Image (tube, grey):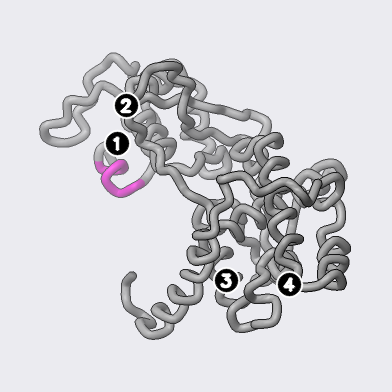
Amino acid sequence: MSDTAALRNGQIPAEDSETPDTVHELYAGDTGTLPAATRQVLVHLLKGPYFERSRSAKLWDELRRSETVIRSRLSDLYLDLFIDDGLGIAFCRRPDLGDHTAPSLLNTVRLRFLDSAMLLELRSKLMQAKSRGERAVITKTEFRDLLRVYDTRAQQDDPLLERHLAGILARFTERKFLLTLKSEDAMEVSPVLPLLFPAAALDELRATYVRRVLREASSPEEHARLLEKLGDAAAGVEETPEAPAAVEDSDDAADEEDAMDETAADENDGEAR
């Protein structure tokens, strides 16, 4: 099969020894100058959220071999390339443009309150597992128990909690924050989380969310119970400061969308959405 046919079929060409400055006409009217494998690497990077060496060792080798030209093409699009050989991970990110303004190809995902809170917990679990030299694995039951602490609206409403849980798990697996395992109940926390969410930013978020949860306690007894459940997450957090503007009341309404989304899914079972 020719390289062009392999590309059209979504396969990786067996070999491509030509140099990037050669004309590579892969289809009628193609004016590109990059070989098929290099183009595929670029597409994977732009598609995001990240490209893994485990996905294709051949394309990873192409990434390293053609890193200079790939970085140049991404720079033309106001993008920077981050590569972690240890983790076998590469992804695009926004560079520091200084005073220059430019549009961005990267999607900006506004995390909902519950999504952000759970990402904090997952990152903490990942760091603990990493210190023991283990993979970070979490079960659906463990995830539900953590969510219940932050989901104050659903603490006494199990059906609502389950709908929120389903929505968050769907988003996290789609964005590859959680990786599915053979066991239907267990998921692996992606080792990429520390790269996507810097520790300083997450510590600030954690303090904000802990304050928010504690402020919503309906009684001193519930306050004490929440402190116990939050454990280390609440250590050193002052309860008096107001939450930063990053946490908005509208996040509650956004979390409620999970319930509506699930209802719509039930009503349109089997239809494309």
Q: Is residue 177 above or below residue 101?
A: below
Q: Residues within 10 Å of mark 4 (few under 14, many from 20)?
A: few
Q: Residue at x 74, y 57 (%)?
A: 137
Q: Which residue is mark 2?
A: 35
Q: Specify which label sits upstream in the sequence, 4 or 1.
A: 1
Q: Which mark is residue 164?
A: 3
Q: Which residue is mark 4?
A: 141
Q: Earlier in the sequence, mark 4 or mark 3?
A: 4
User: Tag 4's secondary structure?
Assistant: helix
> Pointer 4 and pointer 2: residues touching (CB < 8 Å)?
no
Q: Residue 247, position in %: x, y?
A: 58, 51
Q: In the picture, residue 27 is in which quadrant?
A: top left
Query: Disc 1 versus disc 2: distance between alpha carbons?
Result: 9 Å
**3D distance between C-alphas at marks 4 and 2:** 47 Å
Mark nearest the camera among 2 and 3 is: 3
| Part of the protein shown in magenta | 5-10
The amino acid type found where label 4 is placed reads Thr
Question: Which numbered disc, 1 or 2, marks the residue closer to the eye?
Answer: 2
Residue at numbered disc 1: 3
Q: Which residue does the image show at 65% across and 62% down from the upper left? A: 181
* Relative depth, front residue between 147 and 21: 147
* Residues under numbered marks 2 and 3 in contact, where contact means CB atoms less than 8 Å apart: no
Is disc 3 placed on a helix, strand or loop?
helix
